[in-house]
Image: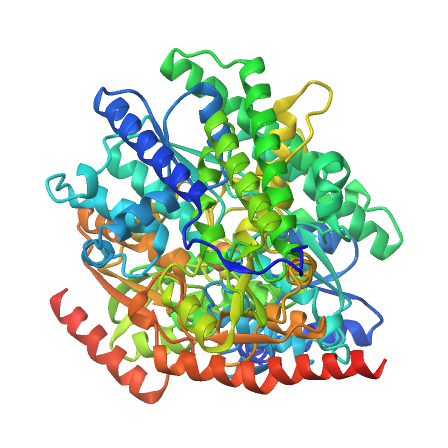
Amino acid sequence: MTDEKKPLLRSEKKLKSAALVQAYQKEWWNQTQERLRQGEPYAICMADDAEDIFTAFDIPVIVIPWWSAMISAKRMSEYYGNVLAAHGYDMDQYGSLGLGVTLDHRPEIAPWGGLPKPLVIMGTTMSDHALKITDLWAREYGCTCFTTELNYNTPTNPYPHRWWEKIRDHWDQVIEPHKIDLKVQELKGLIRFLEVHTGKEFSHAKLTEVMNLVNEQEDLWAKTRDLIAQSSPCVVTLPDQLSMYPAQWHRGKPQGRDIIKAFYEETLERVHTGQVACPREKIRMMWLGVGLWVNTAFFQYFEEEYGVTFVASIYTSIAADGYARTIKNNDPLRALASRFAWLGVQETEWLAHVAKQHHCDGVVGFQCGPRPQLWTRYLEKQGLPVCEIPGNNVDARQWDDVNIRNLMKDFIEKRILPNKKQAGRLKTDD
Amino acid sequence: MTAYERIVKHYQQRNLSALEWKKNGGKVIGYFCNNVPEELIMAAGFFPLRISGDPWEGTETAEGYRMPYPVVAFVETMMNKLLTGKYDFLDYLVIPHARDPIWRLWTQLHFVSELDPQIKLPEIYYYDNLHTTFYTSSVYNRDRTIELKKQLEKWSGKKIPAKALKKAIAITNENKRLLKEVAALRSADPPRISGLEALQIIGTSMCMPKEEHNRLLTAYLQDSESLPAHNGIRLFVEGSPLDNLQFYEVVESCGALVVAEDNCWGNRYSDVPISHTVNLFQSIVDRYLKKSPCPRMFPLQKRIDYCVQKAIESKAQGALFHIYVGDNLQAWEAPEEIKALRANGLPVAYLKKQPYLLSDTDKEGLRTEIKEFIKTL
Ligand code: SF4
C-alpha cells in the first residue's frame, strides 16, 4: 500500500519502462523485417497458439492480432476492410486485416510493404472465423496451413474453484490429461515439420530456457500487478499498464523478462515515493473484455470529471495469473502444451476476482445485445456494479461519445457514488 | 393418413414422438448438430431428439446469456426454447463441440442455476470432439466417444451390448439408404420430390424413432412411381442450417425446385452410411468425423470439394447461397465455394446476411432476386 502520510505526487504521465518496450519492439521489428527480406523462413500465427515454439527455434513469427494492430495504426483498416469486402468477406473481423493486405497484392501501398510468403501459417480452431481466415490466408500465399486443435478458446469442463491459485504448479491436476497429451502430439508434429522445412534443430535445453524465462517474466508481472492492485491511489493506471502489454509478445526472451523487471522496479519505486497516477482518485474501475484501443481520451475524461481511475483489465491480469507453468519431470513441452490448451482468460469467477483484487467499485465493458449480458449479470450477482456501453474494440466509427458519457455519468452518480456512500456510512455506524 | 401426411405432421410437431415415447416410460436425450452418434443413444435405449431452432420463438430470455461473441439467431432460439420450457420433457442433453455458438451453449447453460434458478434444465453432457480429420483427431474423438458411451450407460444403468450397437447401425444405415432413394428421386429428371418435401422427410428422421421413420419411408417410396413429376428450374442450395421451410417455400414459389443441398438439415445428414470395418466403434467415429464435412471442419478445400460434388451430381442449373446474418462460419467459406462452382460452369446467386425469420417484405425481396437469377439461367 502507498504510505498515506507522504504527500502524493502526480506521476509522470509515461512509464519509463514503456519507452523500453517501445524501443525493443522497434528493434525487434527492424530485425525481423531484415530477416524476412533475406528470405528467412517465418511463420504467421494467432496469439497464444504456438509462438513459444518459434521462439525456441529462433524462427521469426508474426502474431495475427499484432499485425492487425500495426495495419490499424497506419490507418488502413478501412481500406483493407474494403479490399476484403470486394473479395466477398464483409464480416468486419479484426483478425482478417492481414489477409486483406495479402489479397490486395499491392506492396507499394501496404504497411511496411506487407509480408512476404511465410513458411507456414498456423491454422487455428480458436474460433469459427479464425479457422477460415488462416486457411484462406495460406491458400492465398500458397503455403502450408498447419492447423492444430485445442487452445485457450477450447471449451473446458467447469473451471476448478480459484484455478489461478493452482494452474502454475498443479496444471496437471487442473487440465484433463488427454488434452495435454493431444497438444503435446500436435506440438511434436509441428516441431518435426519445422525441423524438416528449415533444417534447424529443436533443442530441449533451449525450450527449457524459454519456459524458464516465461515463468520469470510472468512472475514479475504478478508481483507488479499485486503492487498496482494494492496501491491506493493507484500507481499505474490501466492505459499505462496496457502500454507494457507488448512485452507479452516477447515472452521467453531475456528482453521480455528484463522489460517487465524494469516495470516492476519502476512500480515499486512509485509505491515507495508515493507517486500515484491520479492523486484525487475517488473511484476505481475495471475494464471488461478486450482492449479499449479506440479511445484513450475516454479514460482521461472520467479521471478529470469524477476522479475515476481504471486500474484493472483481463490483459494484465491474465499475464500475471495464467501463463506461468512449472516444468515437471524435465518436460518443458508438456508444460507449454498445458498453457496452449488451457488459459482461464474468460472465466467468470476469475473476472470477479480481478475486480475485487484491485478494489474496483465498478466494471465497464461493451454491450453485446439489448439486455445485460451473461458476464454483467454474473458480476452484479457478486456485488460488482457493471456499466455496459455501446460500441466495440475495433471500429472507432461506432464510438458514440455523448451517449457513452451519459451512460457513464448515470452509472457513477446513480450506482457507484451511492454505493460508496452507503459503504462509508456502514463503516461509521460500525 | 398417408405416409407423407404423417411425415408432415411430425415435422410440424417435432416433439410428438418424443412425448409419446416418454408417455410409454422411455427417456429422451436432446442433442445438437450432426456429429453426435445417434446410434449410441439408440443402442443405450434412449430416444435421440435433435434440438432445432424456431424462427418464431424469439430470443428474449437467451439474450440475457449473451457473451461478447457473434450471435446467430437459429442457435439463440434453441437456447430460448431450452430456457422457456419448450424442451422441459428432456431427460438429458448432449452438446457437441460443433460451431462456436453451439458449443458455447455448454458454457452459457452452466450459469442458469445461478442466474435463473427457477429455470429447470436437463442434465447436460459435453461431447468433446475435434475439427480436423488428422489421425490424432480420430483417435482423440474415439476416446471421447467411448466416454460418451460410458455416460449413456451410466444414465441407463446398463451396458450397451455390441449386438445393440450393431442393430442400431443397421437401422440408421437403412434410414440413410432410404433417404438416398429420396435424394435420387429429387434429383431425377424430372424430379419426383420437391425440396420442400425433402426437407420435411429428412428432418423428421431426427425427431422420430428411426424404425418408424423407416416404415414411413418404405411406404412412401413404394408408391414412388405415382409421385407427380415436378417442373421447374433445378437449383442447388448451399448455406446456413435450414431447420424450417421458409426459404424453400420462397424458392419453389418462383418456379424453381431445390434438387439438392449442402445442409445439415438436408442431404448432408443422410448421404453417407456407417461402413463396417474391423473396429465398429472406430467406424462410427470416422463416419462422423471424416465424411460429409460440416462447415466447422478443416480444411476448407474439403468443404469446397463436397459442395461442388453435390451440386454437380444433382444436375442443378444454378446454385443459391443462403447465409444468415451472423453466420460467420458459412460466410467465410462462401466466396471460395462460389468461385469453385462458377469454375465448374454453375451460375450462383449469393443471398447474404439473411434474417432467420422472414417477413413478407423479406420474402418479396428474395423472390425478386431469385426470379432475376432464374431468368439468367
Ligand atoms: S452446420 Fe455443422 S455446426 Fe452448424 S448447425 Fe449444422 S451440424 Fe451444427
Q: How is the image coloured?
A: rainbow
The image position of residue A103, as x and y in percent, is 20, 44
Q: Name the residue rendered at 79%, 78% in the picture.
A: A427
Foreground of the two, A320 or B105: A320
Q: Is residue A150 visible?
A: no
Q: Quadrant of the N terminus of chain B?
A: bottom right
The image position of residue A45, as x and y in percent, is 40, 37
Q: Is residue A23 above or below residue B14?
A: above
Foreground of the two, A286 or B273: A286
**Exactly how many numbered labels are in the figure?**
0
Q: Is residue B62 above or below residue A170?
A: below
Q: In the drawing, does residue B233 fall left or right of residue A230?
A: left
Q: Quadrant of the C terminus of chain B?
A: bottom left
The image position of residue B367, as x and y in percent, is 25, 79
Classify residue B331 by image quadrant.
Answer: bottom left
Classify residue A37 by image quadrant.
Answer: top left
Foreground of the two, A72 or A179: A72
Foreground of the two, A246 or B354: A246
Q: Is residue B9 visible?
A: yes
Q: Residue furthest right?
A: B157
The image position of residue B330, as x and y in percent, is 38, 57
Q: Name the residue rendered at 78%, 67% in the picture.
A: B91
Classify residue B323 by image quadrant.
Answer: bottom left
Q: Name the residue rendered at 55%, 76% in the picture.
A: B63
Q: Name the residue rendered at 76%, 46% in the picture.
A: B149
